[in-house]
């Protein structure tokens, strides 16, 4: 038996005075009032006996009080675990670390169990707790796990960044080595050139004999020049000290010498410095194929001539590249033995696989690539693959051709020469027929009076494209040119059906028939100005996914791979097929190559027309030329119609275009016709192209009005005078534009020369002289507004006025030219005779696109695994730190029941019930820790989860817009993002929950703890998928972080203005619904707290057994802390967890995602190149569209109703 003194010495804190309490009702001390036997306290000085409580005069048995409450009142074992030591006049809760099987006995909690305050029977298992443990002892597994996780993450990240650093150092080292080892590199190149001379030695000797036979060269002289680096390069010019020798000679020592200049002079019969086909073939004696390839390749090597298709060779080019090209053309006719040398070359450079085979893709990096195009190499690779599949050693064609990427030496030697000859002959046949025999016709697009009006105010519109008429003929390459504000991109968008930000008017003809380009969007490719590609994917992967999404349903994977190889070859990307595209954060392909990938994405849909928005923007001149040459190849080889906005093109690029469409400010036509006719047209208007000026830049300056025409008398042939009527008509047309104000403007208009002289324009009856100063001023306007003293605003205004008037005259001149064009010229602009429209494409089904989206999303995540690892580490670390400092669950806190003696012995139910709250105060205080932990982890974790998962939308926003505009299924994309992000974030949170559970040592079922974390992730991800769709991109992260933190903290149920008691109040319906939908931690915190509190025994007031058949409603501990009040079974004693809030929370997240589904389909439609739902419903809404919209709202309304019912339901 423990006395008062023993209890105090043991560390249990007890008051040393008898507490007094106000009695809520008047009590009569008669026997009818007592529910237990009350005796008179006989020895006041000795105090209460063990097992009794007392006041100043009376005492009562604690055991009897327990039994009466349990049996007579039916309250259950609410007094279990009470302790009544000797000398203590009032009730005590059994102290922490002990259990009290009866009021007189105090025993230490046995090892393996944890005993909170007021424990009657040890029931909470704690395997690591020693005897009498006052805390739940953490399992070291949780701490070890978090330490191990952080170590693994740290090592992984350190190795990754170390590897990246080493790669950077390697690049720098190689660059430095290339400088340091320049001398040895020179020796290597000399050796290579000597080897080249040895290879072509037989042919050189034959050429030398042919020269002698034809008498083209005098070989009577003796002596040989010394072989030097220059002579090996094929560009040796023998110095004056060297006697005349044969161009080719072999010394007695076996060394070969060759003089390319002397050889050229010997062949050049007329001595004009140019070798024609006939002159070349006198000695070379190539067949037509070899000769064409020889001349083409030699001219292509000379960058100064590119791009060109010359049928002759000039002397400098011949002297420099003859030996190189001769060596390459010697590959056109190969024996199996020579083919074996090619295989050996690839093997030496790349090695072989386990089967002793070289990889066929390595041919793109071999010497074969020096004389063959990527497209030809692609055909050879395909032929070798087929040969391998059909080889008897492979057992027949039992697998895909694309799977055969290796080739043995025997098969290569057997089939390569034959394939090479067949491919070269096939090219010869195509050239003889004028192009690709398999080319397809592009789309012919004609447009009349086309306008694009953009709303700039409430009821105000401006035309950014104004009354434009023209035609983009099939199989041609058209340039859209103009200055800033000319509406080039707007016209492009209007033509390809992407101008949903405005109202398009006018007539459009597709292949001669009235139609809309929107109806043939699957046949038209659009290349945006920005390179919107997946940076994490390789070049081939980008093309493959584009093809799998956009090619007709049922297209085999082999066909898609073959098309991807063809596109790679056409764009010159075969060597970069397996390279990551890259971006600013990772190394990848070059800017020009990335631009070509951008184009390739559209080519994978096999379009018949491609519209490009400034494809050369941001590229250097060389890369820009490669991009535009690729487009030109598409026009020549495949007949694709190309229309491109171009900005300040260099001459070589501008010459690639067949036609030109020149716009002025405001989207008005200045010129439309062939590139060749542009200069004569503007010359007829009095303009002169300055020497050395780029034609494209000159045309842009004209269209902006920045330059004026030359003096009329300098441009008009006085003898013929054929231009005079046109110029006079132009002046009259211009004056008609502004009859009233123009004369005054011209009178005041001054144009300053270098010396500041002023000339004023007068007016005449026909108005011709009125334009003389404006239209004929020879200086550029941009040089007139800045004087030696600085800029002049007046001169700027004058210059702008002059430019505007000149543009008006240009518009009028073109309209007059167009109206007076003859019938033959008008055919270039009128729609053709109608013919077959483009065929529509049935894209893959929703299910197929969903699986493709999932595959690509997983691949992207894997490529971003370092970032994913860091994000996971942050979430896990945050949850672990909060859990560690929160400590293990305390469950209860030390508290003396502030219940008076009279309440214990009272026989009136209302008296006993009135003191339930102070009776359970010890457990109510313990519940605060759960709420504190729930809101801390809930808010922090929800913010982190949302900020990481929102990147699924924000980081690929532009890619999504582009694909949506290309016809990809939006819903399959959104579903894939939903599924992957949910599993991704769920996995991160689940790992964090495992560590947190070990650190907290939760006493409830582990499953409910994990499910609560998953529910938190589900709701957080739901908001992360919705908010970026309804907020501006620049504000998404701030808005999302604010939303999750603000609503999670203030409406999570633990702090004002909305607490759990407010949600469960009679008038708290609105608050309950608002908190459920807008506060992610609301269900998480309640689930965590209730699950553990349901494990506590009945004496805590949180649970009840069958004995508590008469326990008053609303007087349990859950009611006092306002948790789980809609669940009538919340007080059932159970360690299996509390799942009541899981389903409502899931439905809340589902509802948010359905709203997001509606948002992604209805908002930002212009960026997706789609018309708004409102426009479609008002103008041409189909029954299926109306049905879809109605079904969506019906489903959303029903889901909201079910969710609200689940939140408010009482069970």
Image (cartoon, rainbow, N blue to C red):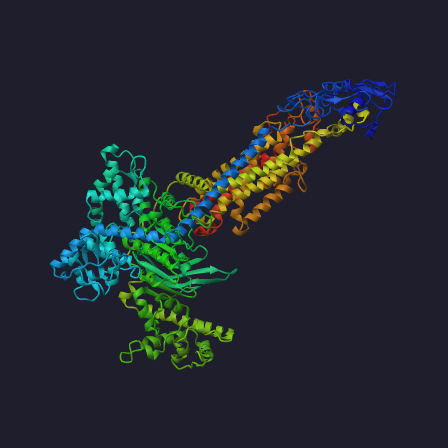
Q: In the figure, 766 relative to 849: above or below?
A: below
Residue 678 position by quadrant: bottom left
Picture coordinates of residue 346, whole percent (x, y): 29, 43
Q: Is residue 599 found left or right of 1091 in the rendered image?
A: left
Residue 63 visible in image: yes
- Left or right of residue 844: residue 501: right
- Horizontal side of residue 223 vs 1087, given as left or right: left
Residue situated in front as seen by the camera: 146 or 615:
146
Q: Residue at x 36, y 69 (%)?
A: 693
**Up-down: is 9 above or below 884?**
above
How many numbered discs, if any?
Answer: 0
> In x, y percent, where is residue 188?
31, 50
Please state, as top left, top right, bottom left or bottom right, where the C terminus lies in the image: top right
Kindly indicate the quadrant of the structure image that contains residue 990.
Answer: top right
Q: Nearer the viewer, residue 607 or 822?
A: 607
User: 1100 or 570, which is in the foreground?
Assistant: 570
Residue nearest the observer in this picture, 151 or 833? 151
Q: x, y percentage for residue 716?
A: 31, 78
What residue appears at the point 34 percent right and 41 percent down from the top-left corner? 553
The residue that appears at 59% across and 42% down in the rendered structure is 1078
Please say whether residue 311 is visible from this viewpoint: no
Task: Give the position of the N terminus as an image quadrant.
Answer: top right
- Percent from the top left, x then y, of residue 824? 26, 65
Query: Against 539, is 690 above or below?
Result: below
């Amino acid at each position: 038996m423990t006395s008062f003194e023993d209890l105090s010495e043991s560390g249990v804190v007890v008051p040393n005075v008898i507490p007094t309490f106000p009695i809520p009702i008047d009590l009569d001390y008669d026997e009818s009032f007592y529910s237990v036997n009350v005796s008179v306290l006989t020895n006041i000085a000795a105090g209460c006996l063990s097992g009794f409580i007392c006041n100043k005069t009376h005492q009562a048995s604690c055991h009897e009080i327990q039994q009466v409450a349990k049996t007579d009142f039916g309250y259950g074992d609410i007094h279990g675990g009470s302790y009544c030591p000797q000398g203590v006049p009032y009730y005590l809760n059994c102290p922490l670390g002990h259990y009290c099987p009866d009021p007189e006995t105090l025993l230490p909690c046995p090892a393996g169990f944890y005993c909170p305050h007021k424990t009657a029977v040890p029931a909470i298992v704690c395997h690591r707790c020693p005897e009498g443990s006052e805390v739940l002892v953490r399992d070291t597994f949780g701490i070890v796990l978090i330490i191990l996780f952080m170590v693994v993450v740290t090592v992984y990240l350190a190795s990754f960044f170390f590897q990246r650093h080493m790669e950077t150092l390697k690049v720098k080292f190689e660059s430095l080595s290339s400088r340091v080892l320049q001398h040895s590199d020179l020796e290597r190149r000399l050796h290579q050139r000597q080897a080249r001379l040895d290879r072509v030695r037989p042919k050189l000797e034959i050429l030398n004999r042919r020269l002698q036979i034809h008498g083209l060269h005098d070989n009577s002289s003796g002596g040989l020049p010394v072989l030097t680096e220059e002579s090996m390069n094929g560009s040796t010019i023998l110095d004056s000290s060297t006697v005349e020798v044969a161009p080719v000679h072999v010394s007695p020592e076996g060394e070969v010498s060759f003089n390319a200049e002397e050889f050229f002079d010997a062949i050049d019969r007329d001595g004009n410095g140019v070798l024609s086909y006939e002159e070349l073939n006198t000695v070379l004696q190539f067949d037509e194929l070899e000769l064409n390839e020889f001349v083409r390749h030699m001219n292509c090597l000379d960058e100064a001539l590119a791009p060109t298709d010359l049928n002759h060779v000039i002397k400098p080019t011949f002297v420099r590249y003859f030996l190189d090209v001769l060596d390459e053309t010697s590959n056109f006719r190969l024996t199996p033995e020579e083919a074996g040398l090619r295989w050996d070359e690839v093997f030496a450079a790349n090695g072989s696989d386990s089967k002793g085979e070289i990889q066929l893709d390595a041919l793109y990096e071999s010497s074969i690539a020096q004389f063959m195009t990527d497209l030809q190499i692609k055909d050879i690779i395909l032929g070798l693959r087929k040969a391998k599949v059909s080889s008897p050693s492979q057992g027949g064609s039992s697998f895909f051709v694309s799977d055969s990427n290796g080739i043995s030496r025997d098969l290569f030697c057997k089939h390569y020469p034959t394939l090479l000859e067949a491919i070269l002959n096939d090219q010869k046949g195509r050239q003889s027929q004028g192009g690709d025999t398999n080319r397809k016709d592009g789309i012919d697009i004609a447009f009349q009076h086309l306008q694009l009006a953009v709303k700039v105010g409430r009821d105000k519109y401006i035309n950014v494209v104004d009354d434009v008429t023209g035609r983009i003929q099939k199989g041609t390459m058209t340039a859209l040119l103009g200055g800033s504000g000319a509406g080039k991109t707007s016209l492009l968008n209007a033509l390809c059906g992407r101008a949903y930000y405005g109202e398009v008017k006018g007539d459009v003809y597709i292949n001669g028939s009235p139609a809309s380009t929107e109806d043939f969007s699957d046949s038209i490719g659009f290349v945006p100005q920005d390179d919107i590609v997946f940076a994490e994917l390789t070049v081939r992967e980008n093309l493959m996914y584009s093809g799998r999404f956009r090619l007709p349903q049922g297209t085999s994977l082999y066909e898609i791979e073959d098309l991807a190889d063809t596109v790679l070859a056409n764009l010159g990307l075969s060597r970069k097929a397996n390279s990551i595209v890259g971006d600013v954060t990772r190394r990848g392909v070059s800017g020009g190559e990335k631009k070509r990938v951008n184009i390739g994405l559209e080519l994978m849909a096999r379009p018949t027309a491609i519209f490009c928005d400034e494809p050369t923007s941001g590229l250097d001149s060389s890369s820009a030329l490669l991009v535009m040459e690729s487009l030109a190849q598409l026009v020549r080889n495949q007949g694709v119609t190309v229309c491109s906005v171009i900005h300040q093109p260099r001459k070589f690029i501008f010459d690639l275009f067949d036609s030109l469409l020149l716009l002025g400010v405001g989207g008005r036509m200045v010129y439309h016709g062939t590139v060749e006719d542009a200069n004569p047209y503007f010359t007829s208007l009095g303009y002169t192209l300055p020497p050395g000026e780029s034609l494209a830049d000159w045309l842009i300056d004209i269209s902006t009005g920045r330059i004026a025409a030359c003096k009329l008398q300098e441009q008009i042939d006085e003898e013929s005078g054929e231009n005079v009527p046109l110029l006079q008509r132009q002046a009259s047309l211009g004056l008609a534009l502004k009859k009233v104000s123009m004369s005054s403007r011209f009178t005041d208009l001054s144009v300053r020369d270098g010396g500041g002289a002023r000339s004023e324009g007068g007016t005449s009856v026909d108005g011709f002289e009125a334009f003389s100063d404006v239209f004929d001023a020879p200086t550029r306007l941009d040089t007139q507004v800045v004087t030696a003293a600085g800029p002049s605003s007046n001169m700027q205004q004058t210059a702008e006025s002059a430019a505007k008037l000149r543009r008006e005259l240009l518009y009028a001149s073109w309209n007059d030219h167009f109206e007076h064009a003859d019938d033959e010229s008008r055919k270039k602009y009128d729609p053709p005779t109608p013919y077959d429209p483009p065929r529509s494409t049935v894209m893959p089904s929703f299910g197929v696109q969903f699986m493709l989206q999932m595959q690509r999303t997983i691949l992207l995540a894997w490529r971003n695994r370092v970032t994913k690892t860091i994000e996971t580490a942050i979430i896990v670390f945050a949850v672990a730190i909060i859990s560690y400092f929160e400590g293990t669950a305390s469950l209860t806190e030390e508290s003396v029941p502030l219940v008076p003696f009279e309440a214990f012995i009272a026989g009136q139910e209302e008296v006993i019930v009135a003191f339930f709250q102070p009776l359970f105060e010890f457990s109510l205080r313990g519940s605060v820790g759960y709420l504190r932990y729930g809101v801390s982890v809930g808010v922090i974790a929800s913010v982190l989860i949302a900020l990481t998962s929102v990147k699924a939308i924000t980081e690929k926003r532009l890619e999504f817009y582009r694909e949506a505009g290309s016809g990809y299924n939006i819903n399959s994309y959104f579903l894939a993002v939903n599924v992957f992000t949910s599993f991704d974030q769920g996995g991160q949170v689940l790992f964090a929950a495992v560590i947190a559970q070990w650190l907290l040592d939760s006493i409830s079922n582990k499953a409910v703890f994990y499910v609560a974390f998953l529910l938190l992730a589900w709701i957080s991800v739901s908001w992360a998928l919705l908010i970026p769709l309804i907020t501006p991109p620049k504000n998404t992260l701030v808005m999302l972080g604010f939303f999750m933190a603000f609503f999670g903290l203030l409406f999570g149920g633990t702090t004002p203005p909305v607490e759990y008691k407010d949600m469960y109040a009679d008038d708290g319906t609105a608050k309950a619904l608002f908190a459920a939908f807008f506060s992610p931690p609301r269900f998480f915190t309640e689930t965590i707290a209730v699950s553990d509190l349901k494990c506590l025994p009945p004496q805590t007031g949180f649970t009840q057994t069958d004995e508590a058949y008469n326990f008053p409603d609303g007087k349990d501990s859950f009611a006092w802390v306002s948790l789980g009040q809609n669940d009538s079974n919340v007080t059932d004693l159970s360690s299996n967890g509390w799942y009541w809030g899981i389903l409502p929370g899931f439905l809340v997240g589902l509802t948010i995602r359905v709203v997001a589904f509606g948002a992604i389909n209805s908002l930002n439609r212009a960026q997706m190149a789609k018309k708004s739902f409102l426009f479609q419903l008002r103008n041409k809404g189909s029954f299926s569209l109306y049905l879809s919209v109605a079904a969506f709202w019906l489903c959303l309304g029903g889901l909201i109703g079910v969710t609200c019912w689940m939140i408010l339901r009482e069970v």
